[in-house]
Structure formats: C-alpha cells, structure tokens
Image: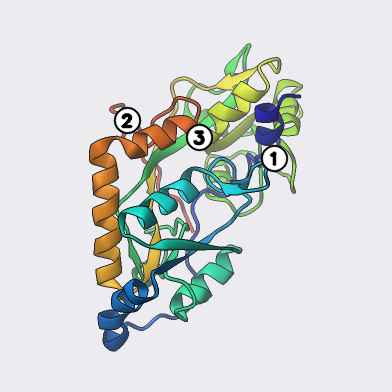
C-alpha cells in the first residue's frame, strides 16, 4: 500500500464533521477583550489547538512525524502574516472548548455547529473550507437509492450520534454502528451488501474512493445536501484577534494561498470556494 493510500485508509468515514459546542459556559469579559490581542502581540506567540489525528486537515507526516495538514498550514501562514510564532497543542474537542474559555489557548481548529445551542458563545473566523454531504452507494445499482426517501429500510453505516446518521435515521434507514473502522471496511461492506449506504462529507468520501479504486462503490451522483463551512474558533469577545485572523485569511483568499494549500492537501480539489450547484438543505431533528 503506497503512502497516500495508507494514510487515507485510516480516515474514519463515520466520524462527525461538525461539532456542537456543549457543556461549557462562556461569559464575555470586556476587560480581557481589550488586552488579549495586545498580550498575543507582546508574547509573539499564537497558541493554537488542533486534533493531530484528522487527515488531511491535521495529522503527523508518516516519515518525519511532523505535524502538518490543511488547517495546520493555514494557521502557520496566518502566524507568518501576523508576525507570530504558532504554538500548537494537540487535544480533543472538550479540551479545546475549555482551553479557549480559560484563556489557555487563543484559537482552535474546531468547527462548532452554528446551529448548536451554545454556538453563540464563541467568536469565529471567516470560512476557510466549504463542503456538503453526499452518500456512497454500490456502483452497479446505487444501492437502490435514487431519492432521499429511498433510504427507508436501507442499512446506513457510520459512527453513532453523528449528523450523518441522524439524517439517515430521519429517512427510515436502519443504522449499522461502527467503532473505529477503516475506510476499506466501510466500503467493502457496502459493496458486499452488508450495508447499503454511507453518508458523510463529500471531500472525505472522494479521497476514500480514490484510495480504494478496486472496491465497486461510488458517490451517488444526484444527491448532495446540507452545505456547510469550516472556520476557526476563538473565545467570545476576542474581537481584535478575530479581526486580525480574518484579515490574514482574506489576503490568503485573494492571493490564492488558500487555494494552493487546498489543492496540495485535497489532491487537486479547491475546498476554499463554494460550489455553484444545486445542494438541498435537510433540517436535522434533535
């Protein structure tokens, strides 16, 4: 298995793409709002959190073990443009939320659902990635799925409690829960009829299919839904930092740097621009 294929094999197709902020209370502190950016500039360091485990956004290079990835390199470029050294800490979601609110971190590569009940408790940068949901089906017959209603009675594969599985359940699919399965297992199970469909992020699915071209599955070509975007999260009230990060991202959009990084890490795909296509929106029931 070549390096690219081996790395992609470890992507979890059933993982959640967007996270709902929960279990944290954040109150705007106007005094810290006015000093946070000054403190960052004085220290010359931007303290950033990233997962380190989510390819191709944040992972360790197989040969050098160096932390890299699409969002990691964006943060490094932001730091360079703001004349700051970026100090990375790898942690899970709960740790990021707590660390932002306690001022242990300045910025997190964490996509909090803006529809979540606590989403208004954080500052956000402008988006650096746009995406949408799609579904993997059998190559020969689309797994019998031509409309969303055809999910009724089908077996949907994925991790528990994700937004993808919630949509499948809403349309009557039988949920087949996986825990830490690799892409080839997910894909072969669809191909062999153990399951029928995998709903997930379009770009993640595209990369998974590219890694395993011998498996007779494909993306359903007529069903794309729930467009969304990804941005960086900061503590509520850190407006000067947010403005500085936005300025750097705007410049990176304008000069093509974001597109270049996307094409490098997403194998030629530019995820930094919204697609001009018909994408339906499905409200997820809680």
In the rendered image, the quadrant that contains the N terminus is: top right
Q: Which mark is residue 265?
A: 3
The Cα–Cα distance between marks 2 and 1, rounded to whole angstroms, is 32 Å
Res. 202 visible in picture: no
Compared to residue 180, the image places residue 239 above or below, namely: below
Secondary structure found at label 2: loop
The Cα–Cα distance between marks 3 and 2, rounded to whole angstroms, is 18 Å
Q: Which residue is mark 1?
A: 62
Residue 219 at what x, y percent from top left? Answer: 54, 23
Residue 112 vs residue 166: left or right? left
Question: Who's the residue at 37% across and 59% down the image?
Answer: 114
Sequence order check, earlier mark of 3 and 2? 3
Question: Who's the residue at 61% across and 38% down the image?
Answer: 173
Residue 151: quarter of image: top right
- Considering every residue shown, the one lying at the far top of the view is 140
Q: Which residue is mark 2?
A: 275
Compared to residue 27, the image places residue 97 above or below, namely: above
Residues at discs 3 and 2 in contact (Cβ within 8 Å) = no
Residue 99 vs residue 119: left or right? right
Residue 278 at what x, y percent from top left? Answer: 31, 28
Sequence order check, earlier mark of 2 and 1? 1
Compared to residue 44, the image places residue 28 above or below, namely: below
Residues at discs 2 and 1 in contact (Cβ within 8 Å) = no
Secondary structure found at label 1: loop
Total labels drawn: 3
Secondary structure found at label 3: helix
Q: Which mark is residue 271?
A: none
Single out the mark in the foreground, 2 or 1. Answer: 1
The Cα–Cα distance between marks 1 and 3, rounded to whole angstroms, is 14 Å
Dot 3, how many residues are within 10 Å of its Cα: few (below 14), some (14-19), or many (20+)?
some
């Amino acid at each position: 298995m070549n390096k690219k294929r081996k790395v992609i094999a470890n992507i979890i197709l059933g993982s959640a793409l967007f996270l709902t902020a929960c279990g944290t209370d954040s109150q705007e502190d106007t005094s810290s709002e006015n000093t946070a950016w000054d403190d960052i500039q004085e220290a010359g360091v931007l303290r950033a959190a990233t997962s380190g485990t989510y390819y191709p956004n944040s992972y360790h290079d197989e040969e050098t073990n160096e932390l890299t990835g699409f969002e990691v390199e964006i943060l490094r470029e932001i730091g360079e443009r703001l004349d700051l050294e970026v100090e990375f800490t790898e942690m899970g979601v709960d740790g990021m939320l707590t660390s932002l609110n306690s001022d242990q971190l300045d910025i997190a590569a964490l996509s909090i659902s803006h529809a979540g009940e606590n989403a208004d408790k954080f500052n956000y940068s402008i988006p650096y990635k746009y995406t949408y949901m799609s579904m993997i089906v059998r190559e020969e017959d689309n797994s019998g799925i031509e409309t969303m209603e055809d999910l009724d009675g089908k077996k949907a594969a994925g991790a528990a409690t994700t937004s993808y599985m919630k949509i499948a359940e809403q349309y009557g699919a039988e949920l087949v829960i996986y825990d830490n399965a690799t892409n080839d297992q997910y894909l072969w199970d669809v191909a062999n009829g153990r399951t029928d469909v995998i709903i997930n992020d379009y770009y993640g699915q595209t990369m998974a299919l590219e890694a395993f071209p011998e498996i007779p599955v494909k993306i359903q070509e007529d069903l794309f839904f729930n467009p969304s975007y990804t941005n960086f999260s900061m503590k509520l009230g850190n407006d000067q930092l947010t403005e500085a990060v936005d300025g750097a991202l705007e410049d990176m959009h304008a000069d093509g740097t974001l597109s270049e990084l996307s094409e490098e890490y997403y194998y030629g795909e530019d995820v930094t621009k919204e697609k001009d296509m018909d994408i339906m929106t499905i409200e997820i029931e809680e």
